[in-house]
Amino acid sequence: MSKMAISIIDQVVEQLKAMPQSLQSEVLKFTLATSKIHGTAGEKLLQFSGAIPLDDLMLIQDAINQNCEQVDLNEW
């Protein structure tokens, strides 16, 4: 990276340095809140194991295999 190309992180750090501590704290809270991984833990999904009959899963797999990576250019 050249000296003229300042990274976004460097720019944010420079802005943070100029902010009062109360605003720095708000930025920290925001980054902590938005960086957490969202989703459901796998163990909570175990209750759904076996919910789709094997025959249906095989049909789904066949459909995926037949149409995988095919693009219909006229679809849109």
Image: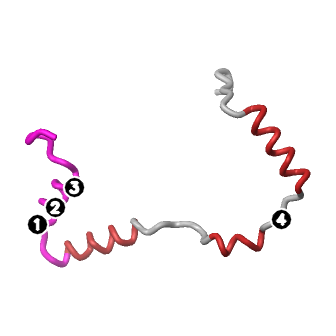
Residue 1 placement (x, y as % from top left) = 16, 41
Crowd band around label 1 with a 10 angstrom C-alpha radius: few (<14), some (14–19), many (20+): few
**Residue furthest top as drawn:** 74
Question: What label does residue 33 carry, if any?
Answer: none
> Residue at horizontal 73%, vertical 72%?
46
Which quadrant of the view contains residue 68?
top right
Instruction: Assess whether mark 1 and mark 2 are in contact (beta carbons under 8 angstroms).
Output: yes
Q: Which mark is residue 9?
A: 3
Question: What is the spatial separation of the Cα atoms under label 3 and label 1, in whole angstroms?
Answer: 12 Å
Tell me if label 4 and label 1 are in contact, CB under 8 Å. no
**Disc 1: which residue:** 17
What is the spatial separation of the Cα atoms under label 4 and label 1, in whole angstroms? 54 Å
Q: CA distance from mark 3 to mark 2?
A: 6 Å
Describe residue 73's horizontal placement relative to residue 31 as left or right.
right
> Helix, strand, or loop for circle 3?
helix
Q: Is residue 10 magenta?
A: yes
Magenta segment, which residues?
A: 1-22
> Image quarter for residue 11?
bottom left
Name which of mark 3 and mark 1 comes first in the sequence. Answer: 3
Q: Which mark is residue 50?
A: 4
Residue 70 % position (x, y):
68, 28
Circle nearer the viewer, 4 or 2: 4
The reply to whether the C-beta atoms of the residues labelled 4 and 2 are less than 8 Å apart is no
Residue nearest the observer in this picture, 38 or 23: 38
Q: Amino acid at mark 1?
A: Lys
**In which image quadrant can residue 12 be found?**
bottom left
- Amino acid on which disc 4 is placed: Gly
- Which amino acid, mark 3? Ile
Task: Give the image's coloring scheme.
Answer: secondary structure
Q: Is residue 60 magenta?
A: no
Frontmost residue, 65 versus 74: 65
